[in-house]
């Protein structure tokens, strides 16, 4: 968490408005977390991360155009102090460590408990050592 903030700043990146809405509801209902933006594409995500400098970014794996893996690769390279988590409805094991993500979370498992656990386990300094496989949360 940034020193000048009292809450964890979260950015949702997903081409589906319904999931962005679900993230908004969960984040707003979870004490200590604040939604600072929503993006529906890689380009929007790049701009919003620069503008808001979030602590935690939830990135959908499957998006049209530039997918979530490439989006995360670009964002994590430019913002190494930010924690990135891949999300998807599909049962898959994306290469989290190859793109800079700390973990993968099935969308079905997303909620207040998962949000708190993600931050507790992967927030900034809590991420896995380089080369370790990123864990799958919520399954």
Image (spheres, helix red, strand yellow):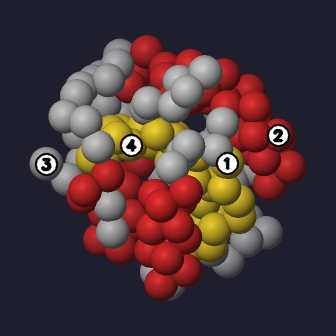
The image shows residue 128, relative to residue 56, as above or below, that is: above
Q: Earlier in the sequence, mark 3 or mark 1?
A: 1
Label 3 vs label 4: CA separation? Answer: 12 Å
User: Looking at the picture, how far across and down is residue 83, in whole percent?
Assistant: 54, 44
Q: Earlier in the sequence, mark 3 or mark 4?
A: 4
Residue 23 in view, yes or no: no
Residue drawn at x 25%, y 56% as measured from the top left: 108
Residue picked out by circle 2: 47
Mark 3 or 1, which is nearer the eye? 1
Does the CB distance between marks 2 and 1 fall below 8 Å? yes
Residue picked out by circle 4: 87
User: Where, by quadrant of the figure, is residue 40 drawn?
Assistant: top right
Residue drawn at x 56%, y 43% as measured from the top left: 15
Residue picked out by circle 3: 139
Residue picked out by circle 1: 39
Q: Earlier in the sequence, mark 2 or mark 3?
A: 2
Sort mark 3 into few (<14), some (14-19) or many (20+) by Cα contacts within 10 Å. few
Label 3 vs label 1: CA separation? Answer: 26 Å
The front one of 96 and 107 is: 107
Mark 2 or 1, which is nearer the eye? 1
User: Looking at the picture, how far across and down is residue 36, in whole percent?
Assistant: 71, 64
Q: Earlier in the sequence, mark 2 or mark 1?
A: 1
């Amino acid at each position: 968490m940034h020193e000048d903030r009292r809450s964890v700043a979260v950015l949702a990146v997903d081409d589906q408005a319904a999931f962005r809405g679900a993230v908004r509801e969960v984040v707003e209902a979870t004490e200590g977390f604040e939604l600072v933006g929503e993006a529906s594409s890689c380009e929007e995500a790049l701009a919003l991360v620069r503008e808001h400098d979030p602590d935690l970014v939830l990135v959908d794996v499957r998006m049209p155009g530039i997918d979530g893996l490439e989006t995360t690769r670009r964002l994590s390279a430019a913002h190494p102090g930010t924690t990135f988590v891949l999300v998807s409805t599909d049962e898959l094991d994306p290469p989290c460590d190859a793109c800079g993500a700390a973990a993968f979370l099935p969308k079905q498992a997303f909620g207040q408990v998962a949000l708190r656990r993600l931050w507790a386990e992967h927030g900034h300094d809590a991420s896995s050592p380089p080369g370790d496989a990123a864990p799958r949360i919520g399954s």
